[in-house]
Amino acid sequence: MYAFFRLLYLGSFAKSAIVAIGAATIPWAAALAALPWDRAALVYWGAALLFFLVLGYRSWQFRREIVDNVKPAADFADALSRGDADAKRKAARQLVAAIAADEDDDEEHPGSALDAGKSGLVRGETRERVARISALLAQAGVPAAREHVEAFLAEHEADHGLPEPLEILAALLPDQHRSLFAEVEDEDTHAALVRDLADATRGAWQVEEVLSRKDEESGACRVSVKEQGRWTHWRFAEYGHVLSCNFLRHLLEHGGRRAGGRFLVCSQEDEFVDVLFLPGTALDALEQASLPLTGTR
């Protein structure tokens, strides 16, 4: 699909060149009546170059649209055919980002002095909120990754939006943030999910062993987790390849309790569920500061 659109793009450039050569004959004919042949030839090639630059710019814009919109869709289709889970996640994120960017381009953003003032106010409030949350985490003994903050601030300043506390926390605590792909690819998916969530607690949730099974015909699933020598079992039904929301909810609650904190759902969009683990000390500090710890859906 992407190769086909690239051919269209090359054809558009070729068409621009042909039209420019043809259109240049008009000023050339007018110049020929008043100028010598060699001067008229310069007028012809100058006009052809000017026409080609104008028409070629439109072709270049067409190429940008292909790269920004068609290529993510083609990469996603290619990732689905390969069956690589990481490639699927990456391609899906790029496709969702391309769709969101395209929707943003379709909206009108009036550039007035009032909008500029509002944007500056939002930037100031965002930095103030980030500094406040960083201080609360430091008081709770939870180290924050400040190196990710500038990129996060730049992204939100471009959007002119005030981020929610959970968005800031996810940027400050990248090791405790997970973007879960809610698709079951094989019977090891549930076990991998448990290990990934346990890793997000940075050792607070000690998982010694995980076993998972799924009957593809009946949809019956069994997940067993060994912690401190004792087993916890979940049995549930899961039809098709969509992760059971009920199992995920129970798993997040169980893992949060075992780790002495809580898993918070930051956002839920398409096949992805973004979660963040917060230790109990951080939860207490943030709740005492009356910061809303709710995500978007």
Image (cartoon, grey):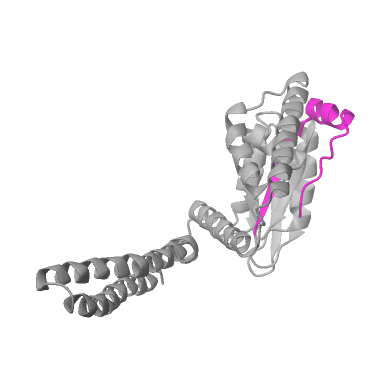
Q: Position of residue 220 (x, y in %)?
A: 71, 62
Q: Is residue 253 visible?
A: yes
In the displayed structure, would residue 252 be above or below residue 289? Answer: below
Find residue 26 and report its image quarter: bottom left
Q: Is residue 226 visible?
A: no
At x 81% / y 45%, what residue is drawn?
Answer: 294
185 left or right, relative to 220: left
Give the camera-side residue of 30 and 169.
Answer: 30
At x 60% / y 39%, what residue is drawn?
Answer: 154
Q: Position of residue 138 (x, y in %)?
A: 73, 21
At x 78% / y 56%, what residue is drawn?
Answer: 246
Q: Position of residue 277 (x, y in %)?
A: 72, 36
Find residue 134 and report its image quarter: top right
81 left or right, relative to 15: right
76 left or right, relative to 134: left
At x 66% / y 61%, what residue is drawn?
Answer: 270
Find residue 195 and report its image quarter: top right
Give the camera-side residue of 153 and 230.
Answer: 153
Query: What residue range appears in magenta?
Result: 271-297
